[in-house]
Image: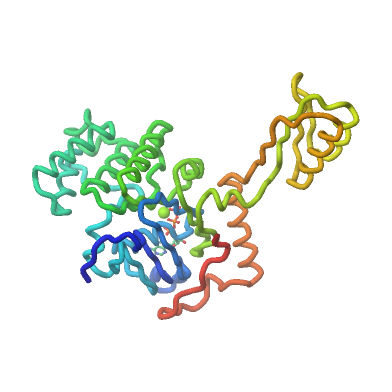
């Protein structure tokens, strides 16, 4: 099916993706994906999160054709992943990228460029450019044997974007990197989006995800437990409100402080920490009734880490309550599993 990259088509669409592993005789089969539905808008940076064993690598490997799903379908810019043409639009960096030890970094990129069908001059130009850009210029003629974990990660990303694909799938691109290396990869992902590329990556490093992602999906034991735009997901709950005021007379302060979890004076301003927006509103009224002036009101929302822990716990509770299908459920190869729950 020939198609062009058109505006309305998502970069990636997954429908009812289900994966059951059959490890071998007498071994229990493993239901790794329970019918995943997902849509990644074009031009976005999308974080794919989940605890160890949640099914992230399974999903990514399936998308690039390294394994066949038990059921379900997916499309890359509208092209079914069962068609090899879909692969022409994807760059992929596997978890712990492996390279042939006897090649140099320059030869490695040349090798992948040839696999992608890039002309010789273009392979050379892009290879040199990316090796310099990723701080590997000094080691480009050294053996891959001597590459550290961080250098392999950088080369893995260079390999994934060598052919300038419009969609890049990265499995744990920041894992094992030092803070500088992580920053470089974060910046590279942002630069890819600026250039119009869509980036879909899995990660455990939630601070990095919170910094750069437009959207996230949280996978828990093969099920989607949350999905949506980050500001929307994290803006749903106010955990506490910090209020600062000046010129508050004793009675007004006393009344407001009774409502607060903590109240203190820093020599210039009075500060109150309140557990809800309702309490903050009451405290504000008390301060203003007393003739004080409100200087600052800062609602504190959930961090991505707090959100992640909450929704994965809720996923556990729902499963234990028997509200969802158990992981040992019989395989239904033709029927995709249930949709994920708490999607925004
Ligand atoms: N080839 C396989 N055979 C049997 N089970 C497998 C196989 N590959 C993965 N699994 C199982 O499928 C589940 C999902 O694994 P997957 O590697 O997709 O998780 P992940 O989210 O990438 O985890 P991590 O964060 O540790 O990389 C796990 O329970 C894992 O043990
Ligand atoms: Mg993995």
264 versus 75 height, above or below: above
| Residue 103 place in picture, x, y as percent | 17, 42
Give the side of residue 33 with respect to residue 248, left or right. left
Q: Nearer the viewer, residue 132 or 20?
A: 132
Q: Which quadrant of the frame does ligand 1 lie within?
A: bottom left
| Residue 160 place in picture, x, y as percent | 27, 48
Residue 133: name its quadrant. Answer: top left
Identify the residue at image location x=17%, y=42%.
102
| Residue 338 place in picture, x, y as percent | 51, 73
For residue 259, say whether it is visible. Answer: yes
Residue 261: name its quadrant. Answer: top right
Residue at far right of view: 251
337 versus 8 height, above or below: below
For residue 18, say whether it is visible. Answer: no
Q: Nearer the viewer, residue 311 or 244?
A: 244
Identify the residue at image location x=46%, y=77%.
331
The number of numbered badges drawn on the structure is: 0
């Amino acid at each position: 099916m020939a198609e062009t990259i058109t505006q309305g088509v998502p970069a990636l669409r997954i429908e009812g993706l289900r994966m059951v592993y059959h490890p071998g005789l007498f071994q229990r089969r493993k239901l790794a994906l329970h019918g995943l539905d997902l849509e990644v808008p074009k031009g976005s940076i999308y974080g794919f999160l989940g605890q160890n064993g949640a099914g992230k690598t399974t999903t990514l490997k399936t998308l690039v054709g390294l394994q066949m799903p038990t059921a379900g379908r997916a499309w890359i810019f509208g092209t079914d992943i069962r068609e090899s043409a879909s692969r022409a639009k994807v760059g992929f960096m596997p978890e712990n990228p492996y390279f042939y030890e006897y090649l140099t970094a320059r030869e490695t990129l040349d090798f992948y460029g040839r696999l992608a069908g890039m002309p010789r001059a273009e392979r050379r130009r892009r290879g040199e450019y990316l090796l310099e850009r990723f701080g590997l210029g000094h080691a480009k003629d050294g053996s891959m044997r001597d590459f550290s974990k961080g250098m392999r990660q950088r080369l893995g990303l260079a390999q994934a974007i060598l052919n300038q694909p419009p969609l890049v799938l990265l499995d744990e691109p920041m894992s094992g990197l030092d803070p500088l290396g992580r920053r470089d990869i974060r910046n590279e992902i942002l630069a890819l989006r600026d250039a119009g590329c869509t980036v879909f990556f899995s990660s455990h490093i939630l601070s990095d995800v919170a910094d750069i992602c437009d959207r996230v999906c949280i996978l828990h034991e093969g099920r989607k437990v949350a999905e949506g735009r980050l500001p929307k997901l994290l803006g749903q709950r106010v955990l506490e409100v910090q209020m600062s005021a000046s010129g508050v007379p004793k009675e007004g302060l006393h009344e407001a402080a009774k409502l607060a979890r903590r109240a203190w004076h820093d020599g210039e301003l009075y500060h109150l920490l309140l557990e809800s927006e309702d309490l903050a509103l009451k405290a504000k009224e008390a301060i203003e009734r007393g003739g004080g002036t409100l200087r600052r009101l800062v609602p504190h929302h959930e961090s991505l880490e707090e959100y992640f822990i909450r929704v994965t716990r809720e996923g556990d509770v729902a499963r234990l309550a028997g509200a969802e299908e158990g992981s040992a459920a019989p395989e239904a190869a033709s029927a995709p599993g249930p949709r994920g729950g708490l999607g925004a």
